[in-house]
Image (tube, rainbow, N blue to C red):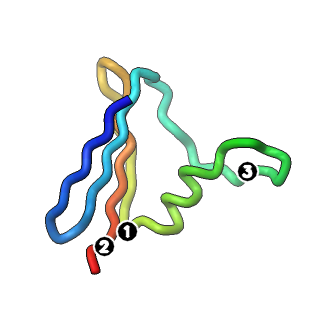
Amino acid sequence: ITLRLLRTDVLRCEVGDDVPQLPRLRQARPSDEGGRGLYLVNRMARRWGATRLSTGKVVWFELAMP
């Protein structure tokens, strides 16, 4: 897992791993132990996305700087 933070007029966070499957936004059930991360990113972030790489994927999001 890799983490990269870039600060310009926004804070961009990039998280990479070696799993090629892209995440999908879904509504977790109350009994689910996982599946809420991307939902939270979608609610809080200005923009977000995911890119498939030959070695896995990178999921990124941007937050407005105060």
Q: Which residue is mark 1?
A: 46
Measured from the top left, where is residue 7 in percent x and y? Answer: 18, 61
- Amino acid marked by disc 3: Ala
- Amino acid marked by disc 1: Arg
**In this rendering, which labeled residue sits more in front, label 2 or label 1?**
2
Q: Quadrant of residue 53?
A: top left
On the picture, is 7 further left or further right than 28?
left
Real-space Cα distance between discs 2 and 1? 7 Å
Mark 3 crowd level (few <14, some 14–19, many ≥20, 10 Å Cα): few
- For the point 48% across and 68% down, the residue is 44
Asked whether the beta carbons under mark 2 and mark 1 sit within 8 Å of each other, the answer is yes
Q: Which residue is mark 2?
A: 64
- For the point 57% across and 50% down, the residue is 37
View extreme (left): residue: 8
Measured from the top left, where is residue 54 in percent x and y? Answer: 30, 19
Quadrant housing the C terminus: bottom left
On the picture, is 19 further left or further right than 61?
right
